[in-house]
């Protein structure tokens, strides 16, 4: 019986993992969920899925990059400077326990969903060392798509390390690209499969998880007590508005401050600094060229919306209208810059991304943004862009929404 092990899935991945696990079990596979915390384990057990948690202990092998993996968690937490010893001990203990688990009950495939933390990378490292195939699943570059890769997601993926030569022999599929662009602009999606509502683990189990997390602080305890609610996706999507935008304009796609793509795949860049640099770059190219900032969801977007700033500022629900009319796009590495490329918009980026291929998008730094924007507007390679997007969408993406999965 083939064994599928889901490594440290977030509770928010429940809408996708529940039908995926059910499908695997119907096909005769054995499914196990490796939980990252007591609250996660209590949740997955309440969904009637076999769940295990690591019991950290022992010494990691000498070849395990413990400090490097701990540095990943340190950056994701917004830390700078030396890695705290506590993070190193956590990864070291998990390494020994994970090695023992994978050796005693080896899976036929390790699936790592929506994770880039140190323990997710540790699971990948341990599985590869034992010859266990790995599949990483993350959000795709278009709404309603998933990225699948054997090495990781986003900047960790093998896709993000490709060059121009990797797309030289690809045959572009204009009909596919036109259909994908139309689906993006129309917010079209396949009907989702029937799904079962998540089960509450129960007050006693939640209280126990909250009390165990209390040593990390009241916030951690409260988060552990209500963690199961992350399995319920937001109901619907906000209605798209169509604001009056300056024409022509450069769109600046901002990302949340805690976005792993920003923290792991780019140098630290504040939203205010990026906006200021974008305005300078746009004015250097053409004094009449405006700037439109597309805010992210969350506290960062709320603060920027309230702060007085020159130029247009719109919410995330307006991103389709903005990308459909923008003269160019500037971003650190927002995934929907891939949709901008699909619409034929020049993209300048300051971080690593799966679509960040030289000749398809233009890499830059804050100081070199005026020159990079002028070069992106001047030097377009539509043939290479179409070949790149064709391979990404045909081979590297699955057309399936994480919160409303369909039969794909």
Image: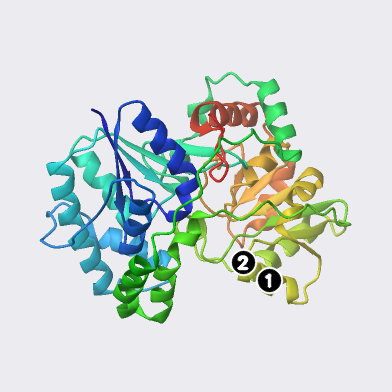
| Mark 2 vs 1: CB contact within 8 A | yes
Q: Note whether residue 236 is visible.
A: yes
Q: Quadrant of residue 11?
A: bottom left
Query: Closer to the camera, 275 or 200?
Result: 200
Callout count: 2
Q: Nearer the viewer, residue 221 or 345?
A: 221
Residue 149 seen in this snapshot: no
Q: CA distance from mark 2 to mark 1?
A: 7 Å
Q: Is residue 206 left or right of residue 93?
A: right
Describe the element under mark 1 as helix, strand or loop.
helix
Q: Which mark is residue 298?
A: 2
Residue at image point 67% right, 67% down: 301
The picture places residue 340, in percent across and down from the top left corner, at 69, 42
Query: Does residue 315 lie above or below 408 as drawn?
Result: below
**In the image: residue 274, left or right of residue 25:** right
Tell me where residue 69 sits by quadrant.
bottom left
Residue 141 location in percent, x, y?
58, 42
Which residue shows up at 18% across the image and 44% down it? 102
- Residue 395 sits above or below residue 373 on the image: above
**Dot 1, crowdedness within 10 Å: few (<14), some or many (≥20)?**
few
Q: Quadrant of residue 18?
A: top left
Q: State the residue at coordinates (80%, 48%).
A: 321
Per the image, the residue denoted by label 1 is 302
Mark 2 surroundings within 10 Å by alpha-carbon count, few (fewer than 14), some (14 through 19), many (20 or more): few
Looking at the image, residue 134 sits to the left or right of residue 341; the answer is: left
């Amino acid at each position: 019986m083939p064994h599928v092990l889901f490594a440290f899935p977030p509770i928010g991945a429940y809408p996708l993992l529940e039908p995926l696990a059910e499908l695997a079990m119907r096909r005769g596979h054995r499914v196990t969920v490796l939980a990252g915390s007591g609250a996660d384990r209590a949740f997955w057990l309440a969904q009637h899925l076999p769940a295990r948690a690591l019991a950290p202990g022992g010494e990691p092998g000498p070849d395990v990059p413990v400090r490097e993996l701990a540095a990943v968690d340190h950056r994701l937490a917004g830390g700078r400077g030396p890695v705290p010893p506590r993070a190193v001990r956590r990864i070291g203990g998990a390494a020994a326990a994970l090695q023992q688990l994978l050796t005693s009950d080896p899976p036929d495939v390790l699936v790592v969903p929506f994770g880039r933390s140190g323990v997710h990378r540790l699971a990948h490292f341990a599985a590869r060392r034992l010859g266990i195939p790995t599949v990483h699943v993350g959000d795709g570059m278009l709404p309603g798509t998933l990225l699948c890769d054997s090495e990781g997601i986003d900047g960790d993926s093998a896709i993000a390390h490709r060059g121009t030569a990797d797309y030289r022999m690809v045959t572009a599929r204009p009909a596919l690209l036109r259909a994908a662009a139309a689906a993006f602009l129309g917010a079209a999606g396949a009907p989702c499969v029937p799904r079962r509502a998540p089960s509450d683990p129960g007050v006693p189990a939640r209280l126990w998880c909250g009390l165990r997390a209390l040593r990390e602080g009241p916030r951690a305890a409260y988060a552990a007590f209500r963690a199961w609610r992350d399995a319920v996706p937001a109901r619907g999507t906000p209605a798209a508005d169509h604001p009056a935008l300056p024409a022509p304009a450069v769109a600046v796609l901002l990302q949340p401050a805690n976005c792993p793509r920003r923290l792991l795949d780019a140098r630290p860049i504040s939203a205010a600094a990026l906006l200021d640099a974008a305005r300078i770059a746009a004015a250097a190219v053409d004094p009449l060229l405006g700037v439109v900032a597309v805010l992210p969801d969350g506290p960062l977007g709320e603060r920027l919306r309230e702060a007085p700033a020159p130029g247009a500022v719109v919410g995330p629900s307006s991103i389709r209208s903005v990308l459909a009319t923008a003269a160019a796009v500037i971003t650190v590495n927002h995934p929907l810059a891939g949709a901008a490329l699909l619409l034929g918009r020049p993209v300048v980026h300051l971080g690593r991304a799966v679509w960040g291929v030289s000749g398809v998008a233009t890499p830059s730094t804050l100081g070199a943004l005026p020159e990079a924007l002028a070069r992106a507007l001047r030097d377009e390679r539509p043939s290479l862009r179409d070949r790149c997007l064709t391979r990404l969408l045909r081979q590297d993406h699955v057309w399936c929404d994480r919160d409303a999965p369909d039969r794909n």
